[in-house]
Image (cartoon, helix red, strand yellow):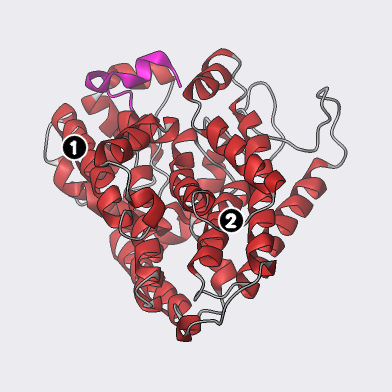
Amino acid sequence: MAREAIHPAQGLPDFSIFYTAGRILRDRQGSRLYDDALQESVQRSFSPLAVQRRGGILPYNHPPFEALLFVPLAHLPYVTAYLTWFLVNGALLGSIPFLLRTRLKALGHAPLYLWLLACLGFFPIFIALIQGQDSILLLFLYCLTYASVGRRSGFSVGGWLALGLYKYHVVAPFALPLWRRKRLIAAFLSVAVSLGLISLAITGWQGLLGYPRYVVGERARREVCLEFAPGTHREPARADFSHGPGGGAPRDPELLTRMFLAIVLLLMMYTAGKTLWADSGRRQAMLALNLVGTILISYHIFVHDLSLLFLAVLLVLELLLSDRPLPNATRTTLWVCIAILFFSPLYQVLSLHYRQLQLMAIVLVIFFLGLLSLVHSLHTRPDGPVSPGASEGR
């Protein structure tokens, strides 16, 4: 993240892509939403300096339906719109403790100010807030999803989750392992189809069918902070597990990457299939595993997307602070991973000084393995009778 990216008056934060999309829809040019020339013209109209410093536009590459959210802000001057969205994100963050405190008994006793400090102290959330990103909204939707699980309403669980499909790469992998929960998936698909129809109304058939091609063609211009694909010095910093510790030549990196993604997804699906939602502890561990696994198998992740890990950390902390017996190795592994994820200077050193933020992927893999051990421990420990709510969320 460049240091000047925090100056909203110059149009440098990521919020400019949403403001651009809102302006295009405001001017009733939805069919040209993914026209680079139009996007550049709009961005130059409110921030010519930002376009000059970047050497080009910061393209809007999200699904069309999300742009509707920013049409009201597009009627405001850019700085006013940025500050308004900043306040909206702040309100969403402030509502998370009220959503979760009553559902996390151990953490619920912590003072409200500690919850708020934890939110702001998590580096990805702080970056999402400053950049005017939409990742905080997605975190909020995931929290609503988790809160709905406890109400035995699979339909609302799937509905809230599907609303996050504007970041489909960190939502669809989370939903896939839950395919056996029929009401959840029915709601998910219903909302997804509705969002698709809204997108069609915005861009028309030509624009909607051209969207996947636009995303694929635009990937080379992204500044990706963590990605499981081979890269070069001129390309975005990416995590590549096909290289050895010394950065040697890869051995069929695409094959190794696909094998890794397949293994992670299969482990997520197997764990979800073996988890009874009637046991809140097992369910929490499984959902935390799904969140971390989704981050790992997503085709690209920016640092602000890691905001989703905040919910995973809360779910794990609740289990660590409970009286459930856990293996010492599992407990230690999870505590260490949580401490590293909350150690903000590490993000800054890796991203600003060394431009190697992809190394955080190593922490996520260890965290994922620790969660697998946690789920296994909760499954194999002695249990009392299962409550009648075993079908919860179906």
* Kind of element beneath mark 2: helix
Q: Seen in the image, is 306 located left or right of residue 46? A: right
Q: Nearer the viewer, residue 341 or 63?
A: 341
Q: Residue at x 28, y 20 (%)?
A: 48
Q: Is residue 131 left or right of residue 312?
A: left
Residue 207 image position (x, y, % from top left) = 40, 57
Q: Earlier in the sequence, mark 2 or mark 1?
A: 1
Residue 23, by quadrant, is top left
- Quadrant for residue 2, please give it: top left
Q: Residues within 10 Å of mark 2 (few under 14, many from 20)?
A: many
Q: Is residue 2 magenta?
A: yes
Foreground residue among 8 and 179: 179
Residue 342, percent from left and from top: 49, 31
Dot label at residue 120: none
State left or right for residue 77 relative to residue 152.
Answer: left
What kind of residue is marked 2?
Answer: Leu
- Nearest-to-viewer mark from 2 and 1: 2
Which amino acid, mark 1?
A: Leu
Residue 228 in sight: no
Q: Which mark is residue 87?
A: 1
Which residue is identified by label 2? 289
Q: Which residues are magenta?
A: 1-14
Query: What separation in Å lies between label 2 and label 1 (alpha carbons)?
Result: 31 Å
Q: Residue 60 location, x and y as percent?
A: 38, 41
Q: Residue furthest bottom?
A: 388
SS at mark 1?
Answer: helix
